[in-house]
Image (cartoon, helix red, strand yellow):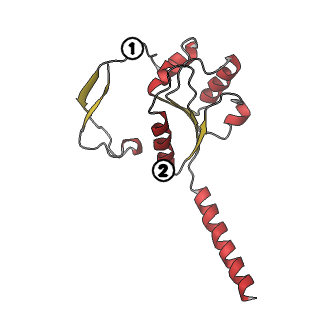
Amino acid sequence: MKAVKFAIVLLSMQLFIFSSTMAQKQFKALLVTTTRGWHHESLHAGVLAIQQLGIKNNFDVVLWEDPKGFTDKFLEQFKVVIFLNTTGDIFDSAQQKVMERFIQSGKGYVGIHSASDTEYDWDWYTKLVGRMFYIHPPIQTFALNIVDDKFPGLQGFSGNKLWTDEIL
């Protein structure tokens, strides 16, 4: 009898911990890594970094490379779509419309690095990204001017650090 009570208490505690951990998740992000051109060596490290950001900041990251199944129904579960080092023409016209509806519904998009080297023939996407990639700009070192160091996306960037990167 004691063993049964102990098992029930243990199971209840595990369910409580599991459900409270799940309840703390803020949102679900779809991480798209499809490439139809250059495949960046840093892609794997980027995936790991975003997964770690999800763990640290309580959001789920779903890794996804194959654009089949990119439908309105599938995207309902996500608050943001992240294009990480995507390249080339990754969506057909139906999938492009799905992405347009997703953004127009008020949900988010994050494009990282070569996301601007994706979907050159899709004017709507070019407007979303702001500018397409045509040539690597020179690598330069510059000082970051952090206006709001309390913003979660700028953790570790306080103090106007020097940064080296490609910049126009």
Which x, y percent locates residue 163? 27, 33
Tell me: 33 left or right of 13: left
In the figure, 64 relative to 151: above or below? above
**Secondary structure of the residue carrying numbered label 2:** helix
In the figure, 96 relative to 157: above or below? above
Q: Residue at x 59, y 39 (%)?
A: 63
Could you tell me the amino acid type at mark 2?
Asn
Q: Quadrant of residue 164?
A: top left
Could you tell me the amino acid type at mark 1?
Ile
Q: Residue lying at the far bottom in this picture: please name it.
A: 1
Which x, y percent locates residue 52? 48, 48
What residue sits right under mark 1 in the picture?
135
**Secondary structure of the residue carrying numbered label 1:** loop
- The quadrant in which the C terminus is found is top left
Of tags 2 and 1, the one toward the viewer is: 1
Q: Residue at x 61, y 32 (%)?
A: 65
Q: Residue at x 63, y 26 (%)?
A: 99
In the figure, 139 relative to 80: above or below? above
Does label 2 or label 1 sit earlier along the sequence?
A: 2
Q: Quadrant of residue 124?
A: top right
What residue sits right under mark 2 in the picture?
57
Total labels: the figure holds 2
Residue 33 versus residue 125: which sits nearer the camera?
33
Label 1 neighbour load within 10 Å: few <14, some 14-19, many 20+: few
Distance between the Cα atoms at labels 2 and 1? Answer: 34 Å
Q: Name the mark on residue 45.
A: none
Which x, y percent locates residue 12? 68, 73
Tell me: 10 left or right of 163: right
Which x, y percent locates residue 38? 49, 21
